[in-house]
Image (cartoon, rainbow, N blue to C red):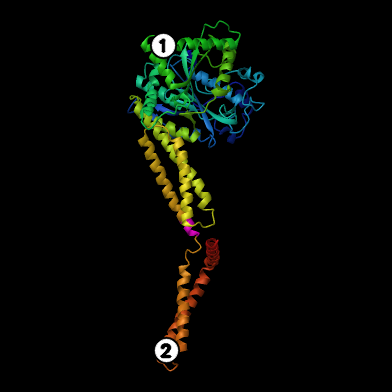
């Protein structure tokens, strides 16, 4: 299938029906012409001037794509891996055509092919979706071209998520899922080291919820061995986690949730051995029977271990087969004319797109140890994994993979827990709260909020060594403690008795001066110069206080108004407290 392998994506060109639309709108405004056209973007590049095997992760590019997914929405990541020149990008370009007609690029919009709102595409609408355009277009998607030389390097994703509607298999609730397509550098191209190949395959496996392993003509034993090798660190990471004395797997938990990866599907290209090519259902039965034979248990130890390895690392292992697309497609000068594609290939392609994107449990969000991730969390995991591959010449050890997974998971647990704590405390003593709480009441509410949030933390931080989880827990408590100090200060600023000393001390001095003068005037002789001097001094004191209060009143009218309110609140609080004691 050499005709279907990609070039490095360039500025996309529009083909088929889109060409006609472009021709009709050739005189459109300059603003319209500057509207960005969806295209593939590179999140991992290979090679620099200093090191041809350097492995560079482009975090900003990934963040830009994931930012288009609404907060809290789940993300399904569909990736295609396999040997070079086997049609990976050609397949992904068909996927894009399918999603364009049956999905939406706007969150919440109704999918184009879902007319009844159930998340499934009606048969009469999906039957000939591939006939709605004349050409696939070499640059209208993940770029592909004929030939024998490799062109794509690294890992590329489509920069525009598609949104599909589905029924959640676990809850039965309707939900929208973002779908991101991933293309990878072809393996075994005589230019890429085994370590770099393993790194690319491994990272693609880690970020995928549905991974398609593209193989030519049949599933051979070396395909199984390569898959087992590239997933080895996942098995070891799982074993290390279970060996941790404090991390016991609950026997009631579904065993599949303990597997590091989700779905791997062997896509066999150019299959020539169907018994019945007119009945798609019977063809799918043949596919299942073929896979059962391939992965059936063997007596030879090495063959048995290879199959056990794959089974222990993936929750689901499936197989689909595609016939040859037609000899017109294999020519080097083929540019995407749909009319020369074999009809049986198109029918199987239709069935396969439905299988991947619209068949119930298959459209699964990315999950780590059974916990489905949002776009933000997925970005944190991908970043943690990608940063391990500092150089393609070094394949990461399983312990490193475990550590990266645990660190990303613990970081998400800390962020979510602190966010939950702030939401709770904002309702109790946040900036928009006007009432004052007694310190002991605030402390008690803080304690309850911390307890509830830590329970949430424990539910999330379940992966990796206990030492790392404990460190994350300490960091979480430290952040919560710092936030609590702010809430205490906010609450104290609403204390009705706060700042009263500014007014009470001068007023007390004035009152004492008045009383003492009255006592002096009443008891001392009017002929006594000492009494007269003391009386005049005391009168000066409360006079100074009086004018001081006038000045304060003129400059701090609002504060005095607040003071009066505080005094009333304090009086009511004291009165209420006395009443409670009597009761």
> Residues in magenta?
489-494
The first of marks 1 and 2 along the sequence is 1
Q: Which residue is mark 2?
A: 531
Q: Is residue 114 left or right of residue 467?
A: right
Extreme residue in the front direction: 583
The residue closer to the viewer here, 202 or 470, is 470
Q: Secondary structure at mark 1?
A: helix
> In the picture shown, does residue 294 fall above or below 463?
above
Which mark identifies residue 221? 1
Secondary structure at numbered mark 2: helix
- Report, in whole angstroms, how far the alpha carbon at label 1 lies from the one at label 2: 116 Å
Q: Nearer the viewer, residue 92 or 477?
A: 477
How many marks do you count on the picture? 2
At 42% across and 86% down in the image, what residue appears?
Answer: 534
Q: In this view of the protein, can residue 48 be seen by the observer?
A: no
Q: Is residue 492 magenta?
A: yes
How far across and how far down the image is residue 532, in percent? 43, 89
Where residue 354 appears, as percent x and y from the top left, is 58, 20
Say if residue 499 shows up in the picture.
yes
Q: Picture quarter containing residue 189?
A: top left
- Nearer to the camera, 352 or 27: 352
| Side of 102 where 314 appears, left or right | left
Residue 505 placement, left or right of 339:
left
């Amino acid at each position: 299938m050499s005709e279907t392998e990609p070039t490095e994506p360039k500025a996309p060109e529009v083909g088929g029906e889109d060409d006609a639309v472009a021709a009709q709108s050739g005189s459109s405004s300059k603003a319209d012409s500057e509207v960005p056209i969806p295209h593939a973007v590179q999140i991992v590049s290979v090679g620099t001037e200093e090191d041809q095997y350097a492995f560079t992760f482009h975090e900003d590019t990934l963040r830009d794509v994931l930012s288009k997914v609404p907060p809290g929405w789940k993300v399904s990541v569909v990736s295609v891996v396999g040997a070079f020149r086997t049609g990976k990008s050609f397949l992904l370009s068909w996927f894009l055509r399918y999603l364009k007609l049956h999905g939406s690029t706007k969150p919440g919009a109704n999918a184009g092919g879902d007319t009844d709102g159930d998340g499934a595409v009606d048969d009469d609408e999906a039957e000939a979706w591939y006939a709605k355009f004349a050409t696939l277009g070499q640059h209208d998607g993940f770029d592909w071209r004929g030939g024998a030389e490799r062109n794509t390097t690294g890992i590329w994703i489509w920069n525009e998520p598609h949104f599909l509607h589905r029924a959640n298999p676990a809850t039965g609730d309707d939900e929208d899922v973002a779908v991101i397509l991933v293309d990878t550098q072809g393996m075994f191209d005589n230019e890429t080291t085994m370590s770099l190949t393993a790194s690319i395959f491994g990272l693609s496996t880690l970020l995928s919820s549905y991974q398609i392993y593209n193989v030519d003509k049949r599933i051979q034993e070396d395909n199984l061995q390569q898959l087992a090798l590239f997933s080895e660190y996942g098995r070891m990471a799982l074993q290390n986690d279970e060996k941790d004395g404090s991390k016991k797997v609950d026997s009631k938990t579904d065993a599949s949730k303990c597997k590091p990866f989700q779905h791997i599907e062997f896509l066999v290209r150019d299959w020539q051995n169907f018994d019945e090519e007119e009945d798609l259902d019977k063809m799918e039965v043949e596919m299942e029977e073929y896979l059962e034979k391939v992965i059936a248990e063997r007596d030879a130890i090495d063959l048995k271990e290879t199959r056990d390895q794959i089974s222990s690392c993936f929750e689901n292992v499936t197989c689909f087969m595609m016939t040859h697309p037609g000899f017109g497609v294999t020519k080097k000068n083929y540019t995407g004319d749909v009319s020369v594609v074999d009809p049986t290939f198109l029918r199987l392609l239709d069935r396969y797109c439905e299988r991947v994107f619209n068949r119930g449990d298959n459209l699964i969000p990315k999950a780590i140890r059974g916990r489905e991730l949002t776009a933000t969390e997925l970005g944190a995991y991908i970043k943690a994994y990608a940063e391990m591959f500092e150089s393609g010449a070094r394949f990461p050890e399983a312990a490193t993979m475990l550590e990266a997974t645990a660190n990303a998971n613990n970081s998400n647990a800390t962020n979510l827990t602190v966010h939950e704590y702030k939401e709770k405390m904002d309702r109790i003593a946040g900036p928009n709260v006007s009432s004052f709480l007694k310190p002991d009441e605030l402390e008690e509410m803080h304690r309850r909020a911390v307890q509830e949030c830590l329970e949430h933390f424990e539910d999330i931080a379940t992966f990796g060594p206990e030492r790392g989880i404990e460190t994350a827990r300490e960091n979480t408590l430290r952040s919560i403690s710092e936030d609590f100090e702010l809430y205490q200060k906010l609450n104290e600023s609403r204390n009705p008795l706060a700042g009263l000393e500014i007014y009470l001390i001068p007023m007390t001095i004035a009152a004492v001066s008045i009383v003492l003068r009255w006592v002096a005037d009443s008891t001392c002789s009017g002929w006594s110069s000492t009494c007269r001097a003391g009386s005049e001094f005391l009168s000066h004191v409360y006079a100074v206080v009086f004018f001081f209060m006038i000045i304060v009143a003129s400059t701090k009218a609002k504060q005095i108004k607040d003071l009066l309110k505080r005094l009333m609140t304090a009086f009511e609080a004291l009165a209420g407290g006395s009443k409670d004691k009597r009761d």
